[in-house]
Amino acid sequence: MSDQKEKDAPAQTKETGSGPGRRKTVRKGMFAKDLKLLMYGFGDVSNPASDSIAVMDDLVINYITDMCQEAAKVAESRGKVRVEDFKYVLRKDKKKIGRVEELLYMNDDIRRAKQLFDEKEMDPADEAP
Amino acid sequence: MFPANSPPYNAISPPPTNRPMMTAAAAVAALKRSSPAQQSNQRRQSGSSSSSATPLHSVSRQGSVETERERSSTPHPANGEETTATNINEDQENESSTKGNANDPQQTQQDAEAEEEDENKEDLLEADMDAFMQAQMEKQKEDMKLLLENFSSEQLQRYEGYRRSALNRTNVRRLVSQVLNQQCSQTMAIVVAGFSKVYVGEIVEKAREVMEEWGHTGAIRPEHLREANRRYKQEQSAASSVGKKLTVMR
């Protein structure tokens, strides 16, 4: 675990390597850019304070980590974690579970629309003289 | 054809207006002055499926859709009647309507329900879910249009920021993969990013409340966020200890 801190030289996540040799670091400041706009959207001033952004970044990373661990607890017997496990963990929180269902629904919707679109593309090509 | 009202679960087919919906709907409802009758309908319907006692016409400033999770309760018999746009729904409807034709309208509603319920319950529910979600989204879009017309330019900017911003999916994916020690799928990253955004919103809102309480103005400071987080954690543990005896207020 201490290896992570030692390799933590740049603040930006620039390496996108894959495979067993890649650095598995969770950089701090991961979501800084996105959180700026996000916090403004939810009620902060148009330029949120940078230390607030850093705190929020920490909170979000901790939150995601906690949720993933809860989901892993739920899926312990099964081994692999699935989306349903997250839905179970969020069962008490109406806003979040509603958002998750909306996202999944829209995801399916888009997929269906794409399939339909692809089919339509194919048909005229077949029928063309 | 089955009549629209089907006891014992729902007296009314899912009316889009009565669900605990996003802020926009709440705001538009305030604009239109929704009647208290809607709230009581909503309570009746949400009583069977979700455990909430309070109708969540939440006046929070977030815009999250809360769907009525009816899987546990509604055997909605309006199988052939709902017209939906998606293919999957049509398939399910064909399936359930062919079975519906086998049961003549002369057969009593209870027999039909008993037979069909077990076989088609999931299909019906899915068709209903989709149809219902579509209806709900339609209503939502209308509400949002109305609301957006009345926004000031500053509000419009903020709304745009709210809609467009999201957590970077790649980073989320990386983080989740690392925590779970497994490969994180696209869908899972979408889901996690989605509810994390809601979390950010809740914290920021709470931080604003804290600021008001403490009489601060301007930008949100870390201490507000920390206090907001503390309260959030408290509420979470309070919500989960509903069944236990709380000896706090003695």
Image (cartoon, rainbow, N blue to C red):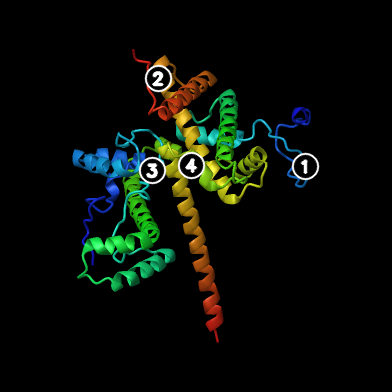
Amino acid under disc 4: Tyr
Residue B173 percent across, percent down from the top left: 63, 44
Residue at 51 percent of width and 47 percent of height? A84
| Residues tagged by mark 2 and mark 4 found on one chain of the structure | no
| Furthest residue toward right | A21
Amino acid under disc 3: Glu
Q: Earlier in the sequence, mark 2 or mark 3?
A: 3
Mark-to-mark CA distance, 1 and 2: 46 Å
Amino acid under disc 2: Glu
> Is residue B102 shown to the viewer in this render?
yes
Secondary element type, mark 3: loop
Residue B9 percent across, percent down from the top left: 26, 50
Please name which of the two marks, 1 or 4, marks the residue nearer to the observer: 4
Q: Is residue B101 above or below residue B228?
A: below
Residue B16 percent across, percent down from the top left: 29, 50
Q: Which residue is mark 2?
A: B212
| Residues tagged by mark 1 and mark 4 found on one chain of the structure | yes
Judging from the image, mark 1 belongs to the subunit labelled A
Q: Nearer the viewer, residue B155 or B197?
A: B197
Residue at 22 percent of width and 53 percent of height? B7
